[in-house]
């Protein structure tokens, strides 16, 4: 897996995971305002300057902030939902029996059943083991007499970047984790 760079806006808000080549392009065009991380992610080497006899070199940091402001307020956008991110958000823990499970032993459980208008979104889904999901069946938790041991929530921008499950360098992980909301399950 190729390493990726965390791209931020000038204020430090995560914008995207970008490739080394995209990051190099930002460095070459002077768009990088500041950078962070414990040392360079990689050093890219180019051709030789004949007049000076020096090879061109770019040290790419794991976290870069670009000039300008984001055109879109990313806090107004709900992070994309997927099964893996839900299980990581819920720490691979069943919302009903509170036991931890392997990913393949969990299901996406609708609090309000899909057959009754429940949606596939962060606030209506929790991780549940197959036994609890089967016991609850097509009922609400109250109807089934099952209490949720934790409540669903929409991940913050910083949580979403951690939930994506990429191979994140320790320094980048620490940088993102230091900006998580106080009540985050990812702390």
Image: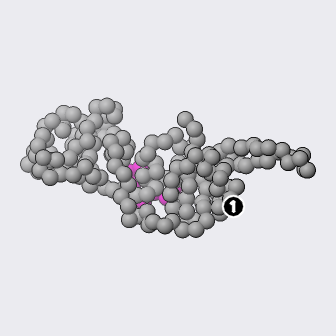
**Relative to the observer, which residue lies in front, 166 or 44?**
44
- Residue 25 is left or right of residue 118, and the answer is right
Is residue 103 inside the magenta stretch?
no
Is disc 1 placed on a helix, strand or loop?
Answer: loop
Quarter of the image that includes the N terminus? top right
Residue displayed at 26% across by 46% down: 126
Residue displayed at 31% across by 36% down: 100
Residue displayed at 15% across by 36% down: 134
Q: Is residue 174 visible?
A: no
**Relative to the observer, which residue lies in front, 104 or 23?**
23
Q: Is residue 179 above or below residue 46?
A: below
Assign the magenta stretch its main secondary structure. loop
Labels in figure, total? 1
**Relative to the observer, which residue lies in front, 145 or 130?**
130
Specify start and end residues of the magenta stretch as a single range.
178-187
Q: Residue furthest left?
A: 143
Q: Which residue is identified by label 1?
A: 30
- Residue 158 is left or right of residue 59, and the answer is left
């Amino acid at each position: 897996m190729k390493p990726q760079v965390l791209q931020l806006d000038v204020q430090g808000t995560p914008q995207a995971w970008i490739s080394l080549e995209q990051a190099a392009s930002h460095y070459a065009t002077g768009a990088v305002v500041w950078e962070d991380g414990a040392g360079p992610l990689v050093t890219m080497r180019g051709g030789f300057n004949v007049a000076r006899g020096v090879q061109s070199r770019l040290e790419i940091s794991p976290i870069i902030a670009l000039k300008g402001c984001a055109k879109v307020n990313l806090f107004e956008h709900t992070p994309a939902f997927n099964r893996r991110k839900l299980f990581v958000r819920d720490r691979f823990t069943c919302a009903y029996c509170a036991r931890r499970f392997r990913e393949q032993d969990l299901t996406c459980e609708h609090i309000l059943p899909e057959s009754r208008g429940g949606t596939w979104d962060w606030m209506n889904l929790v991780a549940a083991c197959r036994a609890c999901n089967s016991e609850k069946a097509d009922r609400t938790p109250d109807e089934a007499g099952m209490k949720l041991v934790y409540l669903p929530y929409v991940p913050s921008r910083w949580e979403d970047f951690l939930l994506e499950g990429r191979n994140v360098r320790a320094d980048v992980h620490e940088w993102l984790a230091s900006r998580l909301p106080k009540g985050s399950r990812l702390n």
